[in-house]
Amino acid sequence: MLFPGDGDVTSPDVSWSATGFNRFREWLAQAEGFALAEMYGFGGDRPWSSVSTTLAPLLDHPDDDGPDLTPTQCAAMLPPLEAIIDQRQHEGSDPVLQRHLDDARQLVAVMRFCLNKDVELIFG
């Protein structure tokens, strides 16, 4: 679950199973032009320094622990996330694609909330 660090349990959040979060990140990485499975920490040996994506703090993150994402990191990730949503939303009605798009929209909403409140995005 990813949620704002504002201490309010009614704030928006987004959640996945561990498998679902991995599939979502694989989809985002593919949209950014690389395969997550090639990357160090995901079965491959390609260093993260070899890819250029502002989504790296989200993609290269432990499933449910690790450092929280700062409002600045959230702000940097919003444009590429929104671009992926805009580009992919016209690709058809595949249920898996629609799930990823819905998840991306929820994540954008949570990140915007974190920015507006100036709080971290917490992995819990």
Image (spheres, rainbow, N blue to C red):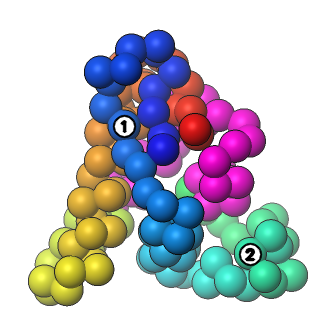
Label 1 belongs to which residue?
Answer: 13
- Residue 86, horizontal then vertical, whole percent: 23, 65
Image location of residue 110, percent across then percent down = 36, 36
Tell me which amino acid carries mark 2. Answer: Phe
Question: What residue is rendered at 46% in x and 68% in y?
Answer: 20
| Residue with the most extreme front position | 17
- Of the residues under marks 1 and 2, which one precedes in the sequence? 1
Look at the image and say whether residue 61 sits in the magenta stretch: yes
**Dot 2, how many residues are within 10 Å of its Cα: few (below 14), some (14-19), or many (20+)?**
some
* Residue in the picture at 59% in, 53% down: 58
Labelled disc at residue 42: 2
Residue 67 visible here: yes
Question: Could you say which is closer to the camera, residue 48 or residue 66?
Answer: 66
* Kind of residue at badge 1: Asp
Circle number at residue 114 = none
Q: Is residue 57 left or right of residue 26?
A: right
User: Is residue 120 inside the magenta stretch?
Assistant: no
- Mark 1 Cα within 10 Å, few/some/many (few <14, many 20+)? some
The answer to whether 75 appears left or right of 84 in the picture is right
Quadrant for residue 34, please give it.
Answer: bottom right
Tell me where the magenta segment starts and ends, as one range: 57-83
Q: Residue at x 53, y 70 (%)?
A: 19
Contact (CB < 8 A) between labels 1 and 2? no
Q: Position of residue 49 (x, y in %)?
A: 81, 65
Q: Quadrant of residue 47?
A: bottom right
Q: Nearer the viewer, residue 112 or 122?
A: 122
